[in-house]
Image: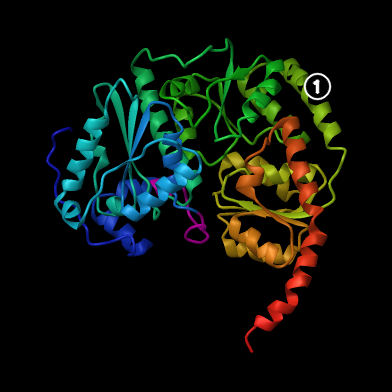
Amino acid sequence: MDGAIIPPVKADTSCHGGKETMQAAARAAGKSAVLDKLALDYPQGPHDQPQSMCPAFGSLRVGLRMRRVATILSGSACCVYGLTFTSHFYGARRSVGYVPFDSETLVTGQLFEDIRKAVRETCRPDDYDAVVVINLCVPTASGVPLDLLPKEINGVRIIGIDVPGFGVPTHAEAKDVLAGAMLKYARAEAERGAVARPRGPIAEGKRVSLIGELFPADPPGVAALLAPMGLSLAPGMPAREWRDLYGALDCTVAAAVHPFYTATIREFAYAGRPIVGSAPVGLDGTADWLDAIGKAADVGAAAIDAAKAKALPGIKAMLENQIKARLVISGYEGSELLVARLLMEAGATIPYVGTALPRTEWSDPDREWLEARGTHVQYRASLEQDVAAMREVKPDLAVGTTPLVQAAKEQGTPAVYFTNMVSARPLFGPAGVASLTSIVATQTAGRDRFARMIDFFAPAAKEAAPC
């Protein structure tokens, strides 16, 4: 609908209006369908929203990690500053487009015209395969209609998405908002006819696409686990280039190793691909996952047995050096249950696992395994729940978000930040066992040091306490 006349949008709210006010404004401005879909894909509760960074960072990160994809933000200047700062802090090294607005351009509908102009100027086929436009809170609440943007200009695809903080609970799920939208677009292209091949060689035979943003060493490790079954890896999701979306769809099985990619999983299902949950972590997890993948790919029992015979003895040997430690684990990455499962097989006692993500059927195998061993799994965990669990459990090591780590260290408990210390290491297969058990062994060895620090500062804290 390029060239459409856009009616004025509502601007009777601001980013300080509160979640309920913003949602009401968005619905009044015609965004009910958008909010209903977000609520279906990313259900909230038991509380409103986990405490974490701005959710839109997840979508921004997915776009910035792709070749030949430009990203344009539409939102309040303070939000855009924070998001671009965070993206560059995480090494984006890419420019981020921004369409500024004020009350007048928002009310009159000029903001949409400005966005359309920016998109048209950015759609340079020599430079880009796609342009992503992301509405933040205020443009979404004001009804800025990205669905009225043209679907492509000069062969450059245009993806417009709403990622409001009052509709998308976490940045992890916002990754899925964009990944799913891109995969939907690519699936429609593939259904219409021939599409570009992924860059580089394509393995023959049956392939598995991994769903989730993974540590770089994990896909090669998974490929080695699959090889005895005659399986190889297709491009994973989120993709690193537009043409990889077609390669991902051309898989035999989609593996939801991160179970919260609801929209992405839906597109694989629409393409007729079977979905397998969980991941190859620890001994039981690797055996169960190889069974599930092999059955979904219909490779036969002999091939499955061969894969397990090659992978499991080495993992079992590595697990013999058991770690004796009591832990709590929490985070907002989506792999918290997998990490807990691996460490429990390695000997750790973990009474509590909290994750900011929702429960989905793809995490059920890991939840059931943990609960059968007495672990309480808290989906959509709040900071207050995590801290309360840490104080009740009195762990040897707390693995979690920054505020949980702070609370643990204040009481003399060793703690590490999940994202930097755990997500930045291999998780799957033998490499995962080696990396995660070494973290626990190293960090729990420092408990006496924390105790000495607490004792050292205790007199000063007593003097500073109010009368």
Name the residue type under label 1. Ala
Q: Nearer the viewer, residue 375 or 389?
A: 389
Residue located at (80% from left, 27% from top): 312
Magenta-drawn segment: 38-52
Q: Is residue 238 within the magenta segment? A: no
Q: Residue 416, how many percent across, how many down?
A: 68, 52
Q: Quadrant of the N terminus?
A: top left
Residue 313 visible? The answer is: yes
Reading the image, the residue beneath label 1 is 309
Residue located at (60% from left, 56% from top): 402
Compared to residue 315, the image places residue 200 above or below, namely above
Q: Nearer the viewer, residue 175 or 118?
A: 118
Residue located at (72% from left, 53% from top): 375
The image's colour scheme reads rainbow
> Disc 1 on helix, strand or loop?
helix
241 vs 120, left or right, is: right
Q: Residue 68, how many percent across, how many down?
A: 38, 26
| Residue 116, image quadrant | top left
Compared to residue 363, the image places residue 399 above or below, namely below
Q: Residue 377, how many percent across, how many down?
A: 66, 53
Residue located at (58% from left, 61% from top): 383
292 vs 79, left or right, is: right
124 vs 56, left or right, is: left
Q: Nearer the viewer, residue 242 or 409?
A: 409
